[in-house]
Amino acid sequence: MNKKPIIIGIGELLWDVLPTGKKAGGAPVNFAYHASRFGAEAYAISAIGNDPLGDEILTEIDRIRIPYIVERVDYPTGTVIVELRDGIPDYTIIEGVAWDHIPLTDEMIRLARRADAVCFGTLAQRAEESRITIQTLLSHVPERALRVYDINLRQHYYSRELITASLRHCNVFKINDEELDLLRGLFDLETDTLHDFCRRFVALYNLRYLILTAGADYSAVFTPAGESYIDTPRVEVVDTVGAGDSFTGTFIASVLDGRPLAEAHRLAVDHAAYVCTQAGAWVGYDSSCDHCMIS
């Protein structure tokens, strides 16, 4: 029996406060959750407050059976106000919260040294303490592992310097078309087409994969050896919260399972489309998700 790959999501753990109520989430934890649905042994690393919202979010993580290293700190548990406009989320992210202060622990380092893949983003690096923790943990990840930088740009919490530093830590880069447009300006590459920009970055940062999602239109995966393009399926969208995270988690778990590029891409596309038909990021699974490999 093959050993399950160990996949880690490091970063924000928070409550998405939606018009219909609050749901637990955070991009790296969303990534870990969906990777676990496709056969990975997935972990979440973050921090929460010594408060009732922290107690509640641990109960939610226990419910979905994701193992975690989540430290309790003297800052409030993170919250994000999510407004939906035609199913598309708009985020107001509260500052000075627990996941801005993820402390580095020996337990985290031991786990990082065993990882087959780790996912991190820009947002969780907005504060110095978490940024140092994330970058230190990445230095302990084995060279063979996939280091996934899901750029996840939100509000003003990014800079060219932080993005460049993060790209140097990664070998998989996940970005959507709106973020890519922003980066073309930030890196003075406005004359590049979207796809030329992707090919440039694959070569420049020695990436194994660059994943580009373009919402309801298509997605593409670029590698040094080839590319894969798939149109986005037409579904009845409830909301798109966590759809990109589900795409990335599914793709990485599928690649680590030995699936070829085209098959891993197709599974990721179909799963993200399914997530869009459900409310929130940590969707339930039933017979309507006929592609899911629920362990």
Image: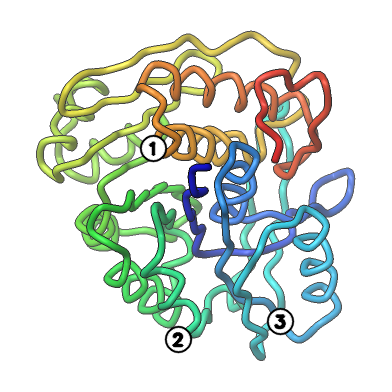
Q: Secondary structure at mark 2?
A: helix
Label placed on residue 175: 1
For marks 2 and 1 on the same chain, the one whose residue lies earlier in the sequence: 2
Work out how far the residue at label 3 is from the one at label 1, CA to CA, in angstroms. 30 Å
Rendered location of residue 132, percent (x, y): 36, 78
Which quadrant holds residue 212?
top left
Rendered location of residue 256, percent (x, y): 41, 39
Work out how far the residue at label 2 is from the one at label 1, CA to CA, in angstroms. 31 Å
Under mark 1, the amino acid is Ile
Under mark 3, the amino acid is Gly
Which quadrant holds residue 294?
top right
Residue where numbered disc 2 is placed: 106
Rendered location of residue 205, percent (x, y): 15, 45
* Callout 3 crowding tier (Cα within 10 Å): few <14, some 14–19, many ≥20: many
Report the side of 62 relative to 267 (left or right). Answer: right
In this rendered view, identify the residue nearer to me: 258 or 188: 258
Q: Quadrant of the C terminus?
A: top right
- Mark closer to the observer (2, 1): 2
Rendered location of residue 111, percent (x, y): 46, 71
Under mark 2, the amino acid is Asp
Q: Secondary structure at mark 3?
A: strand
For marks 3 and 2 on the same chain, the one whose residue lies earlier in the sequence: 3
Residue where numbered disc 3 is placed: 49
